[in-house]
Image (spheres, rainbow, N blue to C red):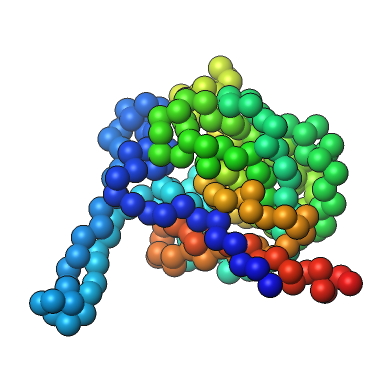
């Protein structure tokens, strides 16, 4: 059995750790702060406080992220984050391009009902924490989202934007539009949670593997930071 860490490290010095709100709708960026509140030297124990955005670093979107009556973070069933997963290898996609339904169809991946679909582009590994990460973001086309839904997946995950590039969306899907970020509505209205900014996906070698993602159970939030991982060497025994 092999356990593979798929999570970004949360740190204060990452400048572009989440959605570039100042560039999209003119609000200040959220920051990450970690500070010691008890030390081994003074208190015989070490403790820290931290503050961060629920949508920064490796995280997931609960339905409440886009829907007024959507499930909040603490209401999402835990089995949404754990299960059999399949990998779509999209490492050939260029910066600024979209993963399409045709790309997924021709990837040769067998998708079963209830699978967690993971799409690998390498984009987080290449440029997370830089402005380029957002300026040249790879996106997921609306037809790709519909294709995944037709396969009856349980959750969707990736190392890139699972919707439009926020800085370069199609003209009719800019933030001011009623049609903004349609894939979020497509997935979240069906309670298909969206896991974003996974990293180290190239370390996964099996086509079918176990996946787990453990979000912090924050009450009433739109999502949460996650510790995501893959487990290889288990399902092969199950199906042998």
Quarter of the image holding residue 120?
Answer: top right
Q: Nearer the viewer, residue 6 or 193?
A: 6
Q: Residue furthest right?
A: 240
Q: Residue at x 61, y 46 (%)?
A: 158
Placement of 191 over or under 162, stated as above or below: below
- Determine whether, in the image, residue 48 is placed left or right of residue 132: left
* Quadrant containing the N terminus in the rendered view: bottom right
- Residue 7 horizontal/vertical position (percent): 50, 56
Q: Residue at x 33, y 52 (%)?
A: 11
- Residue 201 horizontal/vertical position (percent): 62, 50
- Residue 240 horizontal/vertical position (percent): 89, 72
- Residue 221 horizontal/vertical position (percent): 41, 57
Number of disc labels: 0
- Determine whether, in the image, residue 221 is placed left or right of residue 22: right
**Is any atom of residue 70 visible in this view?**
no
Q: Residue furthest left?
A: 42
- Determine whether, in the image, residue 129 is placed left or right of residue 209: left
Q: Residue furthest top?
A: 171
Quarter of the image holding residue 91?
Answer: top right
**Is any atom of residue 27 visible in this view?**
yes
Q: Nearer the viewer, residue 86 or 173?
A: 86
Quarter of the image holding residue 22?
Answer: top left
Q: Residue at x 55, y 60 (%)?
A: 5
């Amino acid at each position: 059995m092999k356990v593979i860490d798929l999570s970004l490290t949360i740190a204060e010095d990452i400048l572009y750790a989440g959605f570039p709100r100042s560039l999209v709708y003119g609000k200040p960026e959220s920051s990450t702060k970690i500070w010691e509140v008890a030390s081994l030297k003074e208190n015989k124990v070490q403790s820290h406080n931290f503050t961060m955005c629920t949508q920064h670093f490796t995280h997931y979107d609960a339905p409440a992220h886009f829907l007024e009556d959507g499930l909040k973070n603490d209401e999402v069933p835990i089995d949404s984050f754990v299960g059999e997963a399949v990998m779509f290898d999209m490492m050939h996609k260029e910066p600024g391009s979209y993963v399409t339904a045709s790309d997924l169809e021709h990837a040769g991946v067998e998708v079963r009902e209830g699978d967690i679909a993971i799409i690998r582009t390498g984009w987080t590994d290449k440029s997370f924490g830089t402005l380029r990460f957002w300026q040249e973001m790879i996106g997921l086309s609306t037809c790709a989202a519909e294709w995944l839904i037709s396969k009856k997946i349980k959750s969707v995950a990736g190392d890139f934007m699972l919707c439009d590039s926020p800085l370069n969306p199609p003209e009719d899907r800019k933030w001011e539009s009623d049609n903004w970020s349609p894939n979020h509505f497509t997935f979240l209205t069906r309670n298909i949670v969206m896991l974003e900014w996974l990293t180290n996906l190239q370390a996964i070698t099996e086509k079918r593997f176990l996946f787990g993602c453990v979000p912090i159970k924050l009450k009433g939030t739109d999502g949460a930071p996650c510790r995501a991982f893959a487990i290889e060497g288990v399902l092969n025994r199950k199906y042998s």
